[in-house]
Image (cartoon, helix red, strand yellow):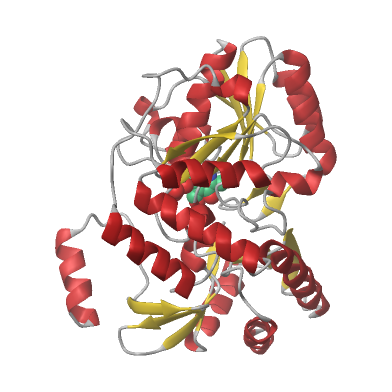
Amino acid sequence: MDFNQIKETGSEYLFQNYGRMDLAFTHGEGCYLYSTDGTRYLDLVAGIAVNAIGYSHPLWVSAMQAQVARLAHVSNLYHIPEQAELASRIASVAPGDLKRTLFVNSGAEANEGALKVAVRYTGRGKVLSALGGFHGRTAASLGATGQEVYRNSFEPLISDAFQYYEFGNCEQIKEMVGPDTAAVMVEPIQGEGGVRTASTEFFKTVRDVCTDRGALMIADEVQTGMGRTGKWFGIENHDVVPDIITMAKGLGGGAPIGAVVTTDEISAVMTPGTHGTTFGGNPLVCASGNAVFTVMKEEHLVEHSHDIGARWMSELRAIGSEKIKEVRGNGLMIGIEMDSAETAAKVKAHCLSNGILVNVCHGTTVRLVPPLIINDVQKAMFNKALKECL
Ligand SMILES: Cc1ncc(COP(=O)(O)O)c(C=O)c1O
C-alpha cells in the first residue's frame, strides 16, 4: 500500500480516536525512521519513550527471531523461563527491596495492577494522585489521571476512590493522606503533563507520610523508568524508595509489556486468582525485555542517558532565546517550554521539514524522549533546527 491507500483504508476501517500526522513508516534503524516515501527522520519521540535501544538493534532482532521460532506464547498456567529471567533482572536494578514482579501488557494495566495490590494490602479504598498527572486510559488508571480532559464523558466508569493533590505541594500531602488512604501515586517526572517534576522534599514527604500513616507510595515509572531519566528509575533522582514501581514503555523496547514491582511482603497479598492476564509476560515480550536489558548494560545506556541529557539541557539553556521559557527534565526526558502553543507548533513543523520528529505535549512543551542510544551528532541536528526556527 502507498501512503494514500494506507490513509484511506485506515480512515474507513479504524476508530478515528487518534489525531495522526500525515506520515507512515516502513522501517527503522538506530535513531532513524524511514517513511513510505523513503524520507529518513531522526526520531526524538521513540514511540513516546518506548524504543530505548533504538530501532532494529541486531541483538534485539536476533533474540526476537529466535524466540518467535521457538515459542511466542504460553499461558501463565505454566512456568515461563524468559519471565523468571526478566523479573530477576528487574530486581537487580530496582531500588531498596523491590524484588518481585507481576507482568502485564501496558502502562495503564501496570497501574491498575498496582492499585489492586495497594487496596488489597492496606484494606483501604482511597487513592491520591497528582493534578496534571497521567496514569493511563483504563477505568482505574483514568480515575488516577488528574486531568479532566482525559476523564470527561467517562465519569460513569470512574470510581469515587480518587482524590487529587497539587503536584509538589508537601502541605497538601500531609493534610490529605488519612486512615482510608490506600496509596499515593506519583510520577517522578510528569510526562504527558509537560515534563514537570517536583522537589526532592516533595517526594520525601510523600514517602514519610505514607510510611507514618500506613499508605503505599506508588511510583509510576511507565515513562521515567528503564534509564530514561539517567537512572534506572526516575525516583532514584530523589533518593526515595517507593513501595511499588510500575513500568512499561522502555521495558519492552517495542514489545507490549508492563510490570508491577514490589516487595516480598506486599506481593504476598496477591494469592492465586487475585489477578492475572492471558498475555502478561509471555515468552515473546519477556525475551524482548531481556534483550533490552542486555543492550542497556552492554552499551551503558543509563550512564549515557544521564551524561548526554545533562549536556543537552545545558546547550538548550545556553540558546538564551526569549521564546524558550524553561528547559527541564532529567537524562533523556527533556521538556522545552516555549512561550506559546504557536511557537511549540512551529518548532515541531520546522523540525519535521528538516527530517526530525519531535512531540509537543501539554500545548507548549516540546518533549524530547529519543532512543537512549542517541549521539552528539544527532543531538546537534536538533539544536541546529531549533536555533534556525527561533
Ligand atoms: C506515566 C504514565 N503512566 C501510564 C501511561 C499509560 O501507559 P500505556 O499507554 O502503555 O497504557 C503512560 C503513557 O503515556 C504514562 O506516561
Compared to residue 192, the image places residue 174 above or below, namely above
Q: Residue at x 51, y 47 (%)?
A: 86
Instruction: Depth check: give the residue in front, 73 or 355.
Output: 73
Q: Residue at x 66, y 87 (%)?
A: 377
- Side of 161 relative to 154 (left or right): right
Instruction: Depth check: give the residue in front, 141 or 249.
Output: 249
Location of residue 204 (image quadrant): top right
Count of marks placed on residues: 0
- Side of 237 relative to 131 (left or right): right
Res 132 visible? no
Location of the C terminus by quadrant is bottom right
Location of the N terminus by quadrant is bottom left
Q: Position of residue 354 (x, y in %)?
A: 52, 89
- Side of 58 relative to 219 (left or right): left
Q: Residue at x 72, y 44 (%)?
A: 235
Q: Position of residue 49 (x, y in %)?
A: 54, 60
Q: Position of residue 269 (x, y in %)?
A: 52, 16
Compared to residue 75, the image places residue 228 above or below, namely below
Q: Position of residue 255 (x, y in %)?
A: 40, 56
Res 12 visible? yes
Q: Residue at x 41, y 27 (%)?
A: 158
Instruction: Depth check: give the residue in front, 17 or 85.
Output: 85
